[in-house]
Image (cartoon, rainbow, N blue to C red):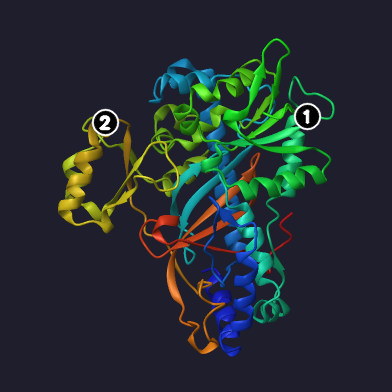
Amino acid sequence: MTKNAEYTQEYLDIMASLDGDVPGRENAFAYMENSTALVHYIQAESSFVPRLFDQETYDTMKWLAETSHSICEKVMRRYLDDPSYRELFDYDERLRELILIPQRYDALLPFARFDVFLNEDTLAGGFCEWNADGSSGMNEDRELNISLAPSATMREFASRHNLQTSDLFNPWVEEFIRIYDTFENKVEHPTFAIADFMENAVVDEFRVYARYFGEHGYPCLVEDVRDLVYDAAKRELRDKKGRKIDAIWRRSVTNDILNNWDASQDMISAVRDGAVALIGSFAGHIVHDKQIFDAVFWPETREMLTEDELRLVDEYVPQTKFLDDAHIDLDAVRANKDAWIIKPTDQYGAHDVYAGQMWSQEEWEDIVDRFSNGKAGAPFLVQTYLTPFRTELLPICNDLLIADDADIPRETAFYNNMPGLYTFNGKFGGVFARLGPKPIISQPMGDLTSAVLWVDCDPIR
């Protein structure tokens, strides 16, 4: 049994003793309203109650993240090296071509986030999905911790415990620089860029990272993939202002690349020619695509894994199959709706994700029929539904600054948890704590972000 619930109750008791710490909540809300914690230009919804994790939780999360990372690298390496293994995956031919472009540096999976449903009483659970370079949330954690620190509740809690936050910026920036230094075509005094499609990008987070790169002595631009221009004769990639780019942190997920195929060709050509380091490479799609949850159970994969890695697969990876008659009994999926969740193989932001618990039997059968056997025009998966762990929190309400103090809600609510575990080139970096009131945790479903604090733990760096 972890101490997490005990710490949370202590925090809530302190807040109650301060009559809800309304000034602290108002100040936290005011800070967040003017912060850089924006998701698609909208202020991130957040909680005044942080996620408070003990040493046992830290150790488990570190094991889950670093072991998952090791498994992913083995799958990626086998895919790149073994044509017969490659054929087991169902990918677009253009995607296969991208994945096989050489990296030319020494990090196979530079950045990843592993989203997990973790029972904090038993530390059992299961993964929701694994993500590569398109992962975000780091800046929300940073800003939330800043917003809570001055509150009377947090000051009192901090006086009783040793608290640590995760630095999700400097370690990654430093690792990115180290990875670039292994690039076979590296240059002196390089300029970096963070590249995505801006309508899908977490732009403010990118700008914060660009500032950190600058503080480490490396200019860093924030660029739309479509604005990059490649001069093959000079082997130079430049932005629309003519600034040369030597390395890219790829935040654009591969399905967005495929959807903007023609407009992405300059970046792709520069990467193919080795004129620019793409950190991480398109091979990261192997991790992002949810087929990997099926792949880790294949005999061809299991033969590569250690006993520790096999234990993680068997205990934490949910059953995941293509939603078609060739891979699973669709009648069984229809008949037991609460046991399943349907999702696309390659999407993000909970688009086209359907948890059986949220639908009537008739609606569920229609969903199964609509997305099975390739009818939607793209492959879909069905996965064992995992019940999230619930914790008590108090949202930072968006009416706090205009309400009378007596009207400000003080009632807590229980939300479902889905912590995302970051790795920076295989080393555990910290957690993105998302919570939601519904079976699917996503922004459209009313999710919140909580700050993460490690309580009375050994030094985490």
**Residue 347 location (% of width, % of height):** 42, 39
Quadrant including the C terminus: bottom right
Q: Which mark is residue 374?
A: 2
**Residue 36 location (% of width, % of height):** 64, 56
Q: Which mark is residue 181?
A: 1
Q: Which residue is most to the front?
A: 241
Q: Is residue 78 above or below residue 206?
A: above
Q: Secondary structure at mark 1?
A: helix
**Residue 252 location (% of width, % of height):** 55, 35
Q: Does label 2 or label 1 sit earlier along the sequence?
A: 1
* In this picture, residue 352 sits left or right of residue 57: left
Q: Secondary structure at mark 2?
A: helix
How many numbered badges does the structure rendering display?
A: 2
Residue nearest the observer in this picture, 313 or 197: 197
Q: Which mark is residue 226?
A: none
Snapshot quadrant of residue 53: bottom right
